[in-house]
Image (cartoon, coloured by chain):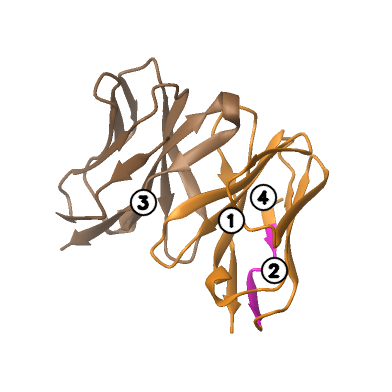
Chain colours: A brown, B orange
Amino acid sequence: GEDVEQSLFLSVREGDSSVINCTYTDSSSTYLYWYKQEPGAGLQLLTYIFSNMDMKQDQRLTVLLNKKDKHLSLRIADTQTGDSAIYFCADGYSSASKIIFGSGTRLSIRP
Amino acid sequence: DTAVSQTPKYLVTQMGNDKSIKCEQNLGHDTMYWYKQDSKKFLKIMFSYNNKELIINETVPNRFSPKSPDKAHLNLHINSLELGDSAVYFCASSPQGWGAFFGQGTRLTVV
């Protein structure tokens, strides 16, 4: 069945880059997404990548997709305290009207 | 002009009660979802509707009954509430096949 996996925690120093990794199992994905959830809030769609792309850059965010290994990563350059949140990787199946989420990676920033 | 709105934001109720959560989207999207987020922040899809038609029911107990009176609304009714139903319930919508935009969540506490 479909599965999306992420490590649960990541701690980085302010100003460094953060790299959050994700693996998924199903090869019929159409889009892959990164969502951000701040405490007490809903999920905010940060960025996405279409499954036939390798890379997408959006200001401080870089998404890399290795379709062969079913590996997705999100790099946040120059990490700031406002980036502290839980980041969810998600796998979209357009034919099934379904989006499956990973367990979320809690990013904490050290001064 | 909130895109996906849920009411209520907080719901505290006793075991055995019946309660409803309402969701409305003004984005003109075809697909709406209910997700459950547990205390460990795991997000699990419960239901997916496309143009008022149920597409996905992810082995949710039949105490949970979604209702979609029109494309812009997807309500969730829960009968005979149990302690284990305590969670944050998120409504989301998407244009078919692409992403999901989330509401702010309803924190349900069953006592």
In the rendered image, which residue does mark 2 sit on?
Answer: B8
Q: Where is residue B70 in the image (x, y as percent from the top left)?
A: 84, 42
Q: Which residue is drawn at 36% across and 51% down?
A: A103
Residue situated in front as seen by the camera: A108 or A2: A2
Q: Could you tell me residue B50's position as x and y percent?
A: 72, 34
Q: Which-is-in-front pick, marks 1 and 3?
A: 3
> Residue A103, labelled with which disc?
3
Label at residue B4: 4
Looking at the rendered structure, the kind of residue marked 3 is Ser
Query: How far separated are the C-alphas under marks 2 and 1?
Result: 11 Å
Name the N-terminal-most of marks 1 and 4: 4
Protein chain holding label 2: B
SS at mark 1 in the image: strand
**Same chain for the residues at labels 2 and 1, yes or no?**
yes
Residue A51: x, y in percent? 40, 20
Q: Which residue is denoted by mark 1 in the rendering?
A: B90
Q: Are marks 4 and 2 on the same chain?
A: yes
Q: Are marks 2 and 3 in contact (CB under 8 Å)?
A: no
